[in-house]
Image (cartoon, helix red, strand yellow):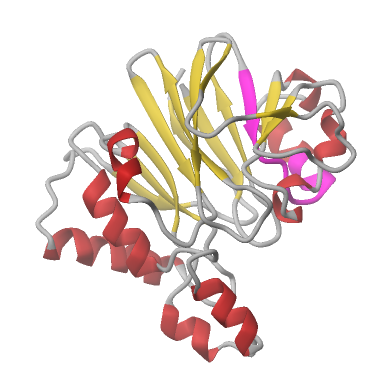
Amino acid sequence: MKFTVLCSGSKGNSTLVETEQIKILLDCGHSKRYLTQSLHNCGVHYDQIDAVIITHNHIDHVSQLKLFKNQPVYAPCLLRDRDDTIILGAYKWFKLGDLSILSVPLSHDADETFGYVIQHDDESLVYITDTGYLKETDFEVLSNADHYIFESNHDVELLMQTQRPYPVKSRILSDSGHLSNEDSASYLARLVGLNTKTIFLAHLSSEANTERHALQALVETFENQKVIINPDLILDCAKQNEPVTGGTI
């Protein structure tokens, strides 16, 4: 299983997941030009995508849905202009090609938001990009995955220094907002295991975060909590305008 975070952030979010049998897209945000060019750079035309899976209906996750009018679209709720949306149930496994996918409800200020656990043979990918918190009862299905694409949206101090209105800051900090660097690091410290080969921190705020802040929070938390990790663990940040690839086919 190979995965490429094509873009991640407030301007757009999309991740390509490929196996020898299937190509799926998790979310389809950003501009048409950027998304099609990024797919092209991966050797994929957008018509070759077999299915699109949406986490939630915010515009930065669905803005290019019209590109995929010929593909089945899976989502937690009915999507605008897609009366044929295949609506997923919470905690339900479903199959696409040689992938098994589990929907995991998250806490975000959308109609409904899901994260996903994607399994291929004995390999697993956890994809969580928009949530204010995680339920402890979900830790079992999220633990010791091979790969994590995991939200680390903001540094709290940097967020409070921005010119954003206070209600916007409150919304981001709320249980239906986004994970801070510290929250993300705390969750990952409890979730990762020796199987974990890749962590891509995702959905970093361009105004209220930096890669240095996000990575430092994670590394310090792992060190302070003496987290035992795979010695070959790859740690990186997903980008807003630059694809980042992990896994292999």
Q: Position of residue 103 (x, y in %)?
A: 51, 33
Q: Is residue 53 above or below residue 49?
A: below
Q: Which residues are magenta?
A: 23-35
Q: Residue 212's quadrant in the figure?
A: bottom left
Q: Is residue 182 left or right of residue 37?
A: left
Q: Residue 89's quadrant in the figure?
A: top right
Q: Is residue 147 left or right of residue 167?
A: left
Residue at coordinates 70% horizontally, 23% vertically from top-left? 51
Question: Which is nearer the eye, 144 or 210?
Answer: 144
Question: Which is nearer the eye, 83 or 15?
Answer: 83
Q: Is residue 112 above or below residue 142?
A: below
Q: Position of residue 19 (x, y in %)?
A: 53, 16
Residue 34 sits inside the magenta stretch: yes
Residue at coordinates 58% horizontally, 87% vertically from top-left? 162
Q: Position of residue 187 (x, y in %)?
A: 30, 55
Q: Is residue 71 above or below residue 216?
A: above
Residue at coordinates 63% horizontally, 30% vertically from top-left? 88
Residue at coordinates 51% horizontally, 10% vertically from top-left? 98
